[in-house]
Amino acid sequence: MTVLRAEGLGKKYKRRWALAGCSIDIEAGHVTGLVGPNGAGKSTLLNLAAGMLEPTTGTIEVCGGVPGSGPDQLAKVGYVAQSTPVYTALTVEEHLRLGAHLNPGWDEKLAQRRVERIGLDPKQQAGKLSGGQRAQLALTLGIAKRPELLLLDEPVAALDPLARREFLSDLMESVAEHGVSVVLSSHLVADLERVCDHMIVLVDSQVRIIGDVEDLRATHHRLSGPRRDLDTLPSDQQVISASHTDRQTTVVVRTDGPILDPSWTVGQLTLEDLVLEYMSNPVTARPALEVLR
Ligand SMILES: Nc1ncnc2c1ncn2[C@@H]1O[C@H](COP(=O)(O)OP(=O)(O)OP(=O)(O)O)[C@@H](O)[C@H]1O
């Protein structure tokens, strides 16, 4: 089953395109990381998927429905926005009560367990929580809702390192136990690497690359060797970035085939290297669109 399908998706604010021509296909059961520079369009994409925004062009379908189209659709999708919105005048326990009231699939046990473990005082007003505690409360509401698809916009940005690790392991537990699909944006690629099996890199409002993390790792190589003209590379090798000194060429290529040329020294890239290559070379790389299976 497809949990998120976008075709030619675009969003324009006044005269500026925040997102343009995005085609994305995410099957259920995946944890998909969304990365890209500031202003690339990550929050815009998540807002479109949550039904908080309407597309200017193209279409987006989430869990088989139009985002934000009614109560059934809202129940299927959990969304924790970057600002981790909470009701400042309500206490922690009132938030949980509200969650139980509004969400047909509410998991009270899970919500209580999380609040206890995080150490939130149920009687404390949300407006008096720290930024990290507010984020934890918002994340608890998102997870305990038991959605089919959980959309998280920079969920760990406000968390301390231990809380971050625990949150990510909670998330993995929810994925394993309840099969929830997740799309989460973050600038912390090392965190994403721990939990994501798929990755989308957005640059300049467009999808630069989308795919299975293992496939991405296996098909990208850093080649270094004697200086040479890039036109001499085999046609199945897509150049992502290249640099030359007087004597040496270093090039990052994407290819499904083996590197047969013995003059290259072949190095593997970490996921972080790979993401940075796409983020810092928006011109040389062509967009690579794939279906996530
Ligand atoms: N409400 C708005 N009105 C006008 N422009 C907007 C609005 N929201 C976002 N934008 C613009 O759209 C572009 C994409 O913004 P978006 O917030 O989606 O990026 P992002 O990738 O989430 O960035 P960040 O990593 O900084 O959170 C940016 O240029 C931003 O200035």
Image (cartoon, grey):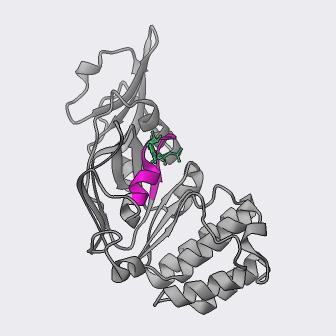
Indicate the quadrant where residue 250 lies. top left
Q: Is residue 107 left or right of residue 251?
A: right
Indicate the quadrant where residue 230 lies. top left
Above or below: residue 47 compared with residue 137: above
Indicate the quadrant where residue 231 lies. top left
Residue 249 in view in this figure: no
Above or below: residue 99 compared with residue 17: below
The image position of residue 264, as x and y in percent, is 38, 27
Location of the N terminus by quadrant is bottom left
In front of the other: 274 or 108: 108
Q: Which portion, as a residue range, is magenta?
A: 33-47
Above or below: residue 165 compared with residue 142: above
The image position of residue 71, as x and y in percent, is 37, 82
Residue 62 in view in this figure: yes
Q: Residue at x 24, y 20 (%)?
A: 232
Location of the C terminus by quadrant is bottom left
Q: Is residue 140 left or right of residue 276?
A: right
Q: Residue at x 28, y 70 (%)?
A: 66
| 14 falls in the magenta region | no
Q: Is residue 122 left or right of residue 38?
A: right
The image position of residue 287, as x and y in percent, is 28, 40
Q: Is residue 256 left or right of residue 32?
A: left
Q: Residue at x 36, y 24 (%)?
A: 263
The image position of residue 195, as x and y in percent, is 53, 63
Q: Residue at x 22, y 36 (%)?
A: 236
